[in-house]
């Protein structure tokens, strides 16, 4: 049992399992997410990583930021790769060739490698029931390849493949609701988290690790390059995502949906959109409909979640 | 001596896998390889093997899971065919580039479009440059024997390269033949214990697999991969020698059939070699000095040894059960590559045959030999590349 106390003082003393000196952009949300996930537990962890920002920046020939066993094989198959690693572990333990050390298996993928090209492998691994956790760090576009639209890109965003032009003003579709799709797999644990609510995120990781079977966690992960925000805005923006209910914090455990934290006061979505250059055109005269459509969608999603959920958390402090 | 049975190629390969008892198999069904993994699944369900079976949602994930499992540190196998191999294509490179000794029976089948489920070599040839060892089998006995040997070859500590063992779809995978099985204990002893190299499951010594390597080192890495492949022939022959001691069955990099004093030769792989041997016997009875070279190890290709075996021949027909549109057949290109080093270059023709399961008939072999006799006499080649058995 390694559900350790989540006290900053204690956590700060712990050894980082994702080392300093990686080459992620300054101000990126992803390494913060990875650190929080790995810090939440003392269990031995083996991780697989989809091709993407996190992977190319954390393990370049001769240098690795991973102090745990780690593997990258391709873009669309982190879930399948970790399922093979987990299967080998089970096989060797069952045969008595390896001591069972309660190893936990995690796959990390960005939204492109998770929502889109990696979706099939992810769905397959979840259905097969591997004892693993899949963590999507969702920055809402293919940031590693130059900010192209993904199916996680929010409505209205300006990306390099859906640029806000005179005729088409950015992305016209809403995001794919992957968290809910993963829940529909009927797996024991699905959650949505944010690095700004670090305690919530780490508690979810701890909880997930105590559950046998497939787990999925979707974590918002700001990208200042793609979001066209300031370098030090990652935590502020993930907090605003939560406060505007753009990124509600909830978990679905054995089919029961629970909102794990609610903002004291639901802020208007524009508070989240405004600091981001990718939504700048939505504030131009004539594009008021875009702001409305974006707000309406968030409201509807939030309403729906509240209807489905029991609320277990406290007011945000 | 092992027991003699009447089994299909698929059944024989499934049985070999049972005897070898891999730690993990990840698989997705595809005709005509389906039956192989189905039979193996039966062994798993009945507790006859310790294998952890991962029944994935695609061949891409099958190879991905095999890659993860192999890196974790254990013996890994899968099987596929045709579109399945094509879907694995990206991951085949990664398995080889990561030096993971995965073993995979490949039941050779045509590729779409148009859709066709029958046997030819277009799948295997598409994976030619992925860095896998490719071993082709003429019949069920060879498929079984090659599969047993391939674990030793792939897992050899000096190479650690994945290997595919090919047999012709339906012709071999589904036909019942006489096969001599090796005793379980002998197979177990021959294959030996799996030796993990840098396993991910070694928690005390964490490894990072799959780094980004840019222009500063990628080129060197690829050359190193080629250099490893140059060591494969030695390993294949070493394993074959041990296999012969155990079974009395002799294997080389290729088979020479009545080639020693031949003036003309046919080069053909897999099941078509059997038919060709019969016709060669008939022509030998008539006094025609014709022989056969049947490549077994297609990757790495044994250029020098093949050149040595063919050096006295005046004319060669290379029969390809796959095509390269706008080019010569892939086997022809290899033989041409081997011939390049010869002082006296033989005349060469290329016949594309048997695509999509089209029968290869004895009279087609006769036509090829007749053409070779003419070429050897006149030195004239009318058409280098032609299709045989095709409706005009």
Image (tube, coloured by chain):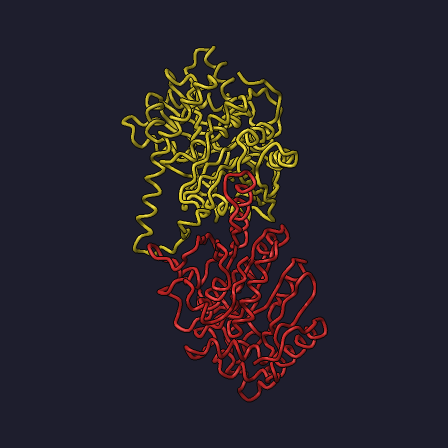
Q: Position of residue B317 (x, y in %)?
A: 43, 27
| In the rendered image, the vertical position of residue A150 relative to residue B25, given as above or below | below
Compare residues B117 and B55 and report the one nearer the observer.
B55
Q: Colour of chain B?
A: yellow
Q: Tag count in the figure?
A: 0
Q: Position of residue B159 (x, y in %)?
A: 37, 37
- Is the C terminus of chain B in the top left, top right, bottom left or bottom right quadrant? top right
In the picture as drawn, the residue positioned furthest to the right comes out as A307
| In the rendered image, the vertical position of residue B390 relative to residue A199, given as above or below | above
In the picture as drawn, the residue positioned furthest to the bottom comes out as A285
User: What residue is shown at x 35% (from left), y 43% (from top)?
Assistant: B225
| In the rendered image, the vertical position of residue A233 relative to residue A113, given as above or below | below
Q: Position of residue B282 (x, y in %)?
A: 50, 14
Q: Which of the 4 image quadrants contains residue B100?
A: top left
- The chain displayed red equals A
Q: Position of residue A110 (x, y in %)?
A: 50, 63
| In the rendered image, the vertical position of residue A151 relative to residue A61, given as above or below | below
Q: Is residue B359 visible?
A: no
User: What residue is shown at x 44% (from left), y 65% (from top)?
Assistant: A144
In the picture as drawn, the residue positioned furthest to the left comes out as B343
Compare residues B80 and A254 and report the one nearer the observer.
A254
Q: Is residue B361 visible?
A: yes
Compare residues B147 and B342 and report the one nearer the observer.
B147
In this picture, residue B111 sits left or right of residue B303: right
Compare residues B133 and A134 and report the one nearer the observer.
A134
């Amino acid at each position: 049992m390694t559900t350790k106390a989540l006290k900053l003082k204690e956590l700060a003393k712990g050894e980082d399992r994702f080392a300093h000196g990686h080459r992620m952009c300054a101000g990126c949300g992803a390494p913060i997410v990875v650190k929080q996930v790995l810090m939440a537990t003392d269990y031995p962890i083996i991780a697989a990583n989809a091709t993407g920002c996190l992977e190319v920046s954390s393990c370049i020939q001769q240098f690795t930021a991973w102090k745990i066993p780690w593997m990258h094989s391709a873009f669309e198959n982190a879930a399948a790769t970790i399922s093979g690693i987990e299967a080998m572990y089970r096989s060797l333990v069952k045969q008595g060739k390896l001591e069972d050390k309660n190893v936990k298996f995690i796959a990390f993928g960005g939204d492109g490698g998770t929502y889109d090209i990696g979706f099939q492998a992810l769905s397959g691994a979840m259905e097969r029931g591997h004892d693993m956790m899949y963590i999507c760090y969702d920055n809402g576009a293919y940031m590693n390849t130059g900010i192209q639209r993904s199916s996680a890109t929010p409505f209205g965003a300006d990306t390099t493949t859906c640029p806000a032009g005179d005729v088409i003003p950015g992305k016209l579709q809403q995001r794919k609701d992957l968290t809910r799709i993963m829940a529909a797999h009927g797996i024991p644990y699905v959650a949505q988290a944010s690095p700004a609510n670090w305690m919530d995120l780490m508690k979810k990781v701890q909880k997930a690790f105590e559950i046998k079977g497939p787990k999925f966690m979707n974590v918002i992960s700001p990208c200042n390059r793609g979001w066209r925000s300031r370098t030090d805005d990652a935590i502020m923006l993930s907090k605003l995502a939560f406060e505007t209910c753009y990124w509600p914090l909830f978990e679905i455990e054995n089919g029961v949906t629970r909102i794990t934290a609610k903002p004291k006061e639901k802020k208007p979505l524009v508070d989240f959109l405004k600091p981001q250059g990718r939504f700048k055109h939505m504030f131009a005269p004539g594009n008021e409909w875009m702001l409305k459509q974006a707000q309406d969608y968030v409201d509807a999603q939030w309403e729906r979640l509240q209807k489905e959920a029991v609320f277990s958390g406290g007011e945000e402090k | 001596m092992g027991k003699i049975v009447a089994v299909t190629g698929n059944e024989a390969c499934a049985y070999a896998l049972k005897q070898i008892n891999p730690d993990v198999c990840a698989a997705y069904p595809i005709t005509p390889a389906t039956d192989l993994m189905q039979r193996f699944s039966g062994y798993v369900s009945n507790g006859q093997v310790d294998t952890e079976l991962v029944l994935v949602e695609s061949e891409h994930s099958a190879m991905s899971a095999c890659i993860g499992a192999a890196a974790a540190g254990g013996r890994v196998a899968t099987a596929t065919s045709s579109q399945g191999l094509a879907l694995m294509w990206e991951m085949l490179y990664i398995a080889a580039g990561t030096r993971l000794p995965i073993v995979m029976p490949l039941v050779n089948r045509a590729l779409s479009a148009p859709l066709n489920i029958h046997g030819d070599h277009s799948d295997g040839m598409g994976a030619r440059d992925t860095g896998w060892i490719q071993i082709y089998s003429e019949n069920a006995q060879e498929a079984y024997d090659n599969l047993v040997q391939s674990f030793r070859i792939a897992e050899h500590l000096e190479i650690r390269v994945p290997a595919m063992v090919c047999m012709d779809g339906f012709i071999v995978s589904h036909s019942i033949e006489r096969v001599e099985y090796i005793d379980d204990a002998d197979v177990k002893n021959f294959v030996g214990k799996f030796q993990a190299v840098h396993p991910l499951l070694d928690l005390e010594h964490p490894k990072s697999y799959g780094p980004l390597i840019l222009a500063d080192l990628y080129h060197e890495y690829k050359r190193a991969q080629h250099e490893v492949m140059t060591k494969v022939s030695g390993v294949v022959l070493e394993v074959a020698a041990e296999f012969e001691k155990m079974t009395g069955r002799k294997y080389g990099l290729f088979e020479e059939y009545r080639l020693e004093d031949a003036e003309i030769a046919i080069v053909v792989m897999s099941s078509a070699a059997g038919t060709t041997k019969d016709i060669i016997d008939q022509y030998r009875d008539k006094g025609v000095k014709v022989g056969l070279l049947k490549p077994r190890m297609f990757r790495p290709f044994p250029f020098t040894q093949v050149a040595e075996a063919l050096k006295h021949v005046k004319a060669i027909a290379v029969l390809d059960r796959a095509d390269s549109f706008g080019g010569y057949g892939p086997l022809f290109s290899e033989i041409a590559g081997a011939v390049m080093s010869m002082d006296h270059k033989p005349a060469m023709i290329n016949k594309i045959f048997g695509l999509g399961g089209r029968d290869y008939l004895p009279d087609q072999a006769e036509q090829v030999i007749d053409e070779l006799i003419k070429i050897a006499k006149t030195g004239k080649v009318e058409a280098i590349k032609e299709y045989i058995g095709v409706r005009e």
